Amino acid sequence: MDSTEQLIKDGGQYLMPTYARYPVAPVRGQGMRVWDPEGREYLDFVAGVAVNILGHCHPKVVAAIQDQAARLIHISNYYQIEPQVRLARLLAERTFADQVFFCNSGAEAVEASLKLARRHMKAARGKGRHQFIATHNSFHGRTLATLTATGQPKFWEGYDPLAPGFVHVPYGDLLAVEQAVTEETAAVLVEPIQGEGGVVIPPPDYLSGLRALCDRHGILLILDEVQTGMGRTGRLFAHEHAGIAPDRRAVAKGLGGGAAIGALLAKREIAQSFGPGSHGSTFGGNPLACAAGAAVLQVIDEEHLLERCQKMGTYFLQQIQRLRRFPFVKEIRGLGLLIGVELSVPGKPVVEACLREGILINVASDRVLRFMPPLIVGEGEINRLVETLERVLSGIS
Ligand SMILES: Cc1ncc(COP(=O)(O)O)c(C=O)c1O
């Protein structure tokens, strides 16, 4: 196997420069830990950016993928795909949704939800309802439409003209949404918590207020649960905390436990606006990813991981309060195991110092340390992280 040094060198030569990668090359993972080619161990509080929801290589996910790979890796959506039907049934049984469209990523799931919204509004209301209200500081993906929906101009640089039909309003502000609704509005698109935007939690009545507003105006509510879904916040989906159901929801990241998969979930009357040929994806809903997804849902149930997430999330949030003694720690916030520590100084040096201490953490929006460990994280690992952070932050003036 190539060394870390060789991988860094060849990666620089052969890969397009879309990521500022850290000089770490994990080649093996188990649970909360990963190892590089030289055998150095790292504790992983990034979990593939909220993807490895059960930790690395959970035995049941590995077995499901191995078993499926030995039987059927790919078959076209021209045919019935057994693991796809099984996963759709599991999702429908556990959520507000009746029907599912499978794709391969978060951006594709949001893109599909935007397309379905326009198609549904056209069918239900006639011409003209094509506009989306999204929020400042949001993140919805990198396709041209989801990039336009993303309310962070730094991601737009060099890509104009952007897709038409989007307006942005401040996050958490119901009045601003109300004022932005016009005769052309098709849907409101929001994250229940802004993840990439820096773990921003809206006021408690925001989602229920949006639900009521959308109902009043006859427009759709689309929730982007790509980062908050699959148990991350202690409920299978974050909107459940608000006691509401969206009209559709985009899911990805944790759904496959590491396998690439995205999904759009919707109620039947809306889902039926997609007809044969109206949308599709060659790899969407492929047997391998769906077998992994079904195993993930099974493990979440069997190992009571939603309860564990609530318990560990509370413990994590309590312990991490110790960082408040540092004057440059502005705010600590989170729900379940999506936790952010906002600094008044750049977070990258903290991430780099943690790397040297053998811990992977992440920074969002430049100044928010973001923690998204697998739902299997334990108190010992949380203690080690907090102790390391205290040591690292002590070295920052
Ligand atoms: C809320 C949200 N939506 C969409 C996406 C895009 O997902 P993907 O990178 O799988 O396309 C992300 C990725 O971070 C996300 O956090």
Image (cartoon, rainbow, N blue to C red):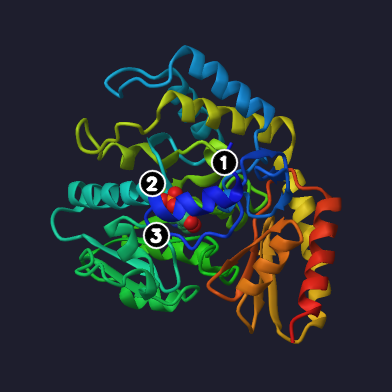
- Snapshot quadrant of residue 212: bottom left
Q: How far, Cα to Cα, is label 3 from label 2?
A: 25 Å
Position of residue 333 in the picture relative to residue 316 (left or right) = left
Report the front residue among 226 and 210.
226
> Which of the two discs, 3 and 2, labels the residue nearer the N terminus?
3
Disc 3 packing (10 Å; few <14; some 14–19; many ≥20): few
Q: Nearer the viewer, residue 329 or 211?
A: 329
Q: Is residue 297 visible?
A: yes
Front tag of 2 and 1: 1
Badge 1 marks a residue whose secondary structure is loop
User: Tag 3: residue type?
Assistant: Pro
Residue 109 is tagged as 2
Q: Secondary structure at mark 3?
A: loop
- Where is residue 375? Give x, y as percent: 70, 45
Looking at the image, residue 141 lies above or below residue 93: below
Residue 190: mark in rendering:
none
Name which residue lies at 41% across and 59% down: 140
Residue name at image x 49 percent, y 33 percent:
92
Image vertical order of residue 382 relative to residue 58, above or below: below
Frontmost of labels 3 and 2 is 3
Front residue of 217/113: it is 113
